[in-house]
Amino acid sequence: MSVSTGLPANWNVPLFWATVDGSLAGNLTQNQPALLVGQYNSTGANAGTATANALVAVGSPALGQLLFGRGSMLTRMVNAFFKVNPNQLLYCIPVPDPGAGAAATGTITIATAPTAAGTLFIYIAGQLVQVSVAATDTVTIVATNLAAAINAAVDLPVTAASSLGVVTCTCIWKGLTGNDITCIPNYLGGTAGQIFPLGLTVTVPPPSTTNAWLTGGTGAPTFTTAISNIQANQFFYVGMPYNDSATEAVWATEFGFGATGRWSFSRQQYGFVVNSYRNDFADAITRGLSTNAPVISSMAIEQQAPSPIWEWAAAYCGLAANAFQDDPARPLQTLEMLGVLPAQLQFRFSQAQLNNLTNSGFAIQAVAPDGNPMILREASQYQLNSFGQADTAFALLTTLATLAFLLSDLKSAITTKFARVKLVPDGTAYGPGQAIVTPKTILGELIARFIIAQFNGLVSDVTDFTNNLVVQIDSTNPNRVNVLWPPQLAGALRIFSVLAQFRLLFQPNVSGASTSIGL
């Protein structure tokens, strides 16, 4: 029997007839879109035009502002994402406020009036608000001017009202996340000229284990409709601000390895979720040890870090998307989260605390010499296997990113080359040109794909891979192939450990001359 060209056997019209088959010509292109999840302004003067729970592509910060409203959580997330990754294909899912939720509130008290002119510098959610202060201003005047400046800054996530020297700020949305908004006077300090005018004192409630500044925010959005509306879409990278246990459980199920999760055989929509978590060290450790989702990575940030958790999450997501799309096996360490403000030096986690945090299910960050936060370790929440024993199988996002790439590549190769073939056992004698595949043919294809992946630095040890690779026709179903696919994923240089065994004087050899080795 001849090679099958696609021309029917009963076609008798002369002469030249050609069909085109591109199954062996193309290469897999993985678009790997990202997704941001957050609340938006649905009403008011700064309302966005987006529809609740409707997936929408966002190509620029300006479009995000139009869709989600100025000052909204999701608009600020889009801004943070594009600061570190301006070229990514980005989608957003705007979720409405929790129906039974409450908006967080907080106060700024002008405690004493100034005796000299100057400028009041207040950072709210990491954004600077400046107010001119006259030497003759009363506490009421300073508070009134501060409230006016806050309301004039329409990209802030709060509104303000003043009374008798007290400015009361209210988050523009409802929910627990409002409790994460910070207020830090003179963030850059005296060396940058940020000091209170003489005589002026300002009181802001300090952060606690339940809030950064604002308090009283309650409730979290319901994600049933939002998740239903995105289930047909592939998202490799998801950034969201929510870190309450109920919300994390919902997203861990959607992106998990369970029967209905995106990593299951029936969906194969690989990806992971990143968020961030603000608390003091002790409470963060307690919280981290209670989590174990392999598809969620939570970035630990200090209580005094000015930027809110939704902007940390968006920046983290943007960096991961940019770096992993270039090379899924390379670690994210030292990548800088531009536009996000870190905690002041005296409030940052110590090296020992960072080590304990990453051993407790947190991704960790530090500050680069130029003052920008940078990723130190992109750890997932995963710490224990199903028997409750310590396990590192999914401890790092590089594992998920590499597996997602390799499996997508393998699926593309198999479905492209073997879409319509017959399956016969090894050793079967069949004529040339037959659309037939045997287990050995498939095994050869898998090894070839592995060699390409090894050349690209994603895996290693082709010998052990080949020795442990198994391709078999199922013993009860002649139309099914079962494969044991055992790749050794590439590691990463994360720790460089040195024993500095110095000497003050090397002892001479027996001949009296010092020993040297020429290199």
Image (cartoon, rainbow, N blue to C red):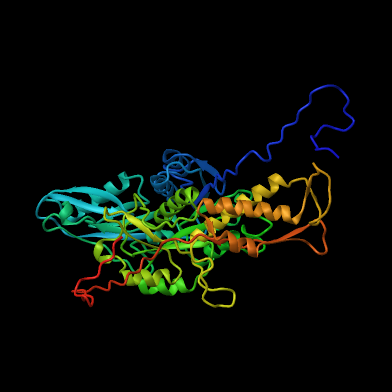
Quadrant occupied by the N terminus: top right
Q: Is residue 57 above or below residue 275?
A: above
Using the image as rendered, state which of residue 111 and residue 211 is in the foreground.
211
Q: Residue at x 30, y 49 (%)?
A: 150
Q: Quadrant of residue 12?
A: top right
Using the image as rendered, state which of residue 334 and residue 497 is in the foreground.
497
Q: Residue at x 62, y 39 (%)?
A: 26
Query: Relative to 282, is 329 on the left or the right?
Result: right
Asked whether residue 369 is in view, the answer is yes
Using the image as rendered, state which of residue 83 and residue 113 is in the foreground.
83
Q: Is residue 493 above or below residue 28?
A: below
x then y, percent, for residue 324? 48, 52
Quadrant occupied by the C terminus: bottom left
Residue at the extreme front: 511
Count of number-bearing discs: 0
Query: Relative to 219, is 140 on the left or the right?
Result: left
Q: Is residue 347 above or below residue 457?
A: below
Q: Residue at x 40, y 63 (%)?
A: 494
x then y, percent, for residue 443? 69, 56
Query: Relative to 473, is 85 on the left or the right?
Result: left
Query: Relative to 197, is 372 on the left or the right?
Result: right
x then y, percent, for residue 402? 53, 56
x then y, percent, for residue 493? 41, 61
Q: Quadrant of residue 181?
A: bottom left
Asked whether residue 256 is in view, the answer is no
